[in-house]
């Protein structure tokens, strides 16, 4: 165990191959991991492993509609596929831009955001109607997005080392902020209490003011990060590093980011999902 007491408690075997984002499906008490050609589901009660939603180059599997469906981004077919969470049956297939990657949901507008990594745009989808509600042209290789609850989204643009701030309802870019000291931003999270953004870069994480875009802090974290999880209750950000094989814990108890621990995980673990329960 590391100094904080956080430590690995279980390792659950799955099929070999390419892994991507991790999501906790609270409604169905399971963890979803996109696995290239399907979505792997891990039952949190029994640890049983199953798979559903076969596809090509899958990236994200985001529960929507109260957990009744899962939105799966399919990079190989440039689509977002909605599947029944219980049966795995396809409910609808929606065309996106090129290389749909990360997804996010905005409760203010009720829209899902699909970041088209190779197409340089965000595809907005109404998960209730399974219809495209518009697009936002941003440019660059987009990674994860965080929303602030007021209708704004903040999207990491990996190849430009910047965050794009967008107004979802207006479907427009508000600002593009360069991230000094950040190489290849991927994961991003929003600390609503302190009104701060936390973006994971390669070997560092930056704390950003979501109003001005100013980089307030740069904190040394592990190489190979591809995600951030933020626990609002404990005011802790978790930054996994796949090449370093570590998990950095950043405390925001004082309103400022402080690294309080670096927990050994294992090489090849760059993404993360948080069970808020």
Image (spheres, rainbow, N blue to C red):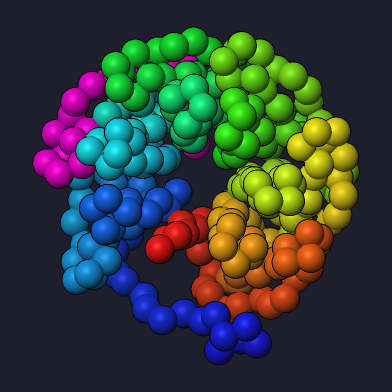
Q: Is residue 178 visible?
A: no
| Relative to 64, residue 7 above or below | below
Residue 247 position by quadrant: bottom right
Q: Is residue 68 found inside the magenta-colored segment of the image? A: no
Picture coordinates of residue 173, whole percent (x, y):
70, 17
Q: Is residue 272 left or right of residue 142?
A: left
Q: Can residue 67 be seen by looking at this rendering?
A: yes
Image-quadrant location for residue 88? top left
> What residue is at 23 percent from the left and 63 percent from the top?
43
Residue 195 percent across, percent down from the top left: 73, 45
Task: Tell me: 201 left or right of 18.
Answer: right
How many circles with numbers are drawn on the protein?
Answer: 0
Q: Which residues are magenta?
A: 83-102
In this view, 18 is above or below 107: below
Q: For this view, does 3 lie left or right of residue 40?
A: right
Quadrant occupied by the C terminus:
bottom left
Residue at the image point whose x is 30% and y is 22% from the top: 128
**Horizontal and vertical percent for residue 211?**
80, 33
Q: Is residue 92 left or right of residue 24?
A: left
x, y percent for residue 218: 84, 56
Please tell me whether residue 89 belongs to the stretch shown in magenta. yes
Q: Nearer the viewer, residue 216 or 48?
A: 216
Q: To which quarter of the image does residue 258 belong?
A: bottom right
Q: Quadrant of the N terminus?
A: bottom right
Measuring 37% from the left and 78% from the top, which residue is drawn there?
10
């Amino acid at each position: 165990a590391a100094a904080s007491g956080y430590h690995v408690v279980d390792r659950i075997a799955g099929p070999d191959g390419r892994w991507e984002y991790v999501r906790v499906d609270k409604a169905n008490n399971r963890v979803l991991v996109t696995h290239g050609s399907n979505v792997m589901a891990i039952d949190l009660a029994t640890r049983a492993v199953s798979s559903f939603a076969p596809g090509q180059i899958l990236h994200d599997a985001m529960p929507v509609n109260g957990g009744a469906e899962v939105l799966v981004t399919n990079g190989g077919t440039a689509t977002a596929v909605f599947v029944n969470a219980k049966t795995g049956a396809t409910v609808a297939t929606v065309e996106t831009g090129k290389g749909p990657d990360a997804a996010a949901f905005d409760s203010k507008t009720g829209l899902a955001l699909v970041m088209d990594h190779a197409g340089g745009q965000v595809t907005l989808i109404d998960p209730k109607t399974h219809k495209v509600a518009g697009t936002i042209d941003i440019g660059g290789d987009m990674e994860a997005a965080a929303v602030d609850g007021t209708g704004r989204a903040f999207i990491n643009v990996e190849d430009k080392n910047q965050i794009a701030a967008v107004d979802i309802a207006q479907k427009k870019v508000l600002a593009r902020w360069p991230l000094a000291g950040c190489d290849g931003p991927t994961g991003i999270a929003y600390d609503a209490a302190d009104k701060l953004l936390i973006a994971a870069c390669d070997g560092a994480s930056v704390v950003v003011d979501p109003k001005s875009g100013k980089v307030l802090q740069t904190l040394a974290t592990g190489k190979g990060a591809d995600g951030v999880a933020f626990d609002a209750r404990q005011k802790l950000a978790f930054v996994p590093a796949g090449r370093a094989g570590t998990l950095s814990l950043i405390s925001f108890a004082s309103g400022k980011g402080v690294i309080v621990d670096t927990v050994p995980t294992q090489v090849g673990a760059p993404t993360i999902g948080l069970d808020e329960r």
